[in-house]
Amino acid sequence: MSGFDGERTGILFVCWGNICRSPAAAYLFASLAREKGMENRFVVDSAGVSDEEEGNGVYPPMRRELEKKGIDCSAHRARRLREGDYDAFDLLVCMDELTIARTRRFFGGDPKNKVKNLLDFTGQKGAEIADPWYTREFGQAMDQIETGCAALLDALAGEDVMTVDLSACRDREGIYAVLREKMDWKDWYGSNLDALWDVLTGLEHRGERFRLILPPEESEIASYAKLVRETFREAGALEEE
């Protein structure tokens, strides 16, 4: 990865046809970088593992999701991966296991470990963003993409603000599984609010300040997730929105 040693970091977002998830990720990541005054630190593009949508624009429902965020994607034209993409970009960020597998196959492997899964950056290792062309859940896909892009930007910028996405958690076990993965808790650390407090106030862990994405209000775990957030706040580790 080029990092910030005078060169820009190249990121290629990859999905199936390059008309929904990957262009949305590219435009959204670029928008988030601009908001932070970091637009000159990245080269961002997108591609698909299939050529079936070659030359097409962003699929209208996904285009409307981008427009809701004030993002104009009218210039986009879908393209397939090219042989030179592996050397041209520092990261090839995919949306699911299928596109990861197809991307690695296209390049005959991944010798420099450039092929990544977007939601891995949120602490949800192996989590996938389903293709909304099939699911029709364009808003949900956009929310996941935004969460992933924010976490990726945090990671690349070397910021001390870490995004922890708890939105998919359905119970306490799930919450602590995400915290353990994202914050790199030691095996002997407990799985409760007292343990979380101890981690935030002295035990070894990854991260300094945190941005939490909570489960939906209607979920059964929502009340407990708010206690988790309050623990972060009381420990002085929560990045307020």
Image: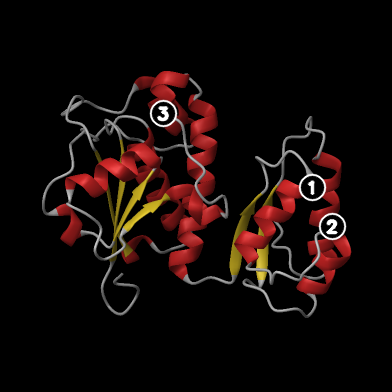
Residue depicted at 81% across the width and 39% down the height: 221
User: Which tag is nearer the camera, tag 3 or tag 2?
Assistant: 3
Task: Tell which circle, 3 or 2, labels the residue nearer the N-terminal end.
Answer: 3
Secondary structure under badge 2?
helix
Q: Amino acid at mark 2?
A: Glu
Secondary structure under badge 1?
helix
Task: Find disc 1 in the rendering and name its residue.
Answer: 172
Q: CA distance from mark 3 to mark 2?
A: 34 Å
Image quadrant where one finds the C terminus: bottom right
Task: Find disc 2 in the rendering and name its residue.
Answer: 230
- In depth, the one of 207 and 161 nearer the eye is 207
- In depth, the one of 107 and 134 nearer the eye is 107
Compared with 97, 12 (above or below) is below
Residue 52, numbered circle: none
User: Which tag is nearer the camera, tag 1 or tag 2?
Assistant: 1
Position in image of residue 21 (x %, y %): 38, 35
Question: Circle 3: is it few (<14), some (14-19), or many (20+) Cα within 10 Å?
Answer: some
Residue depicted at 55% across the width and 53% down the height: 122
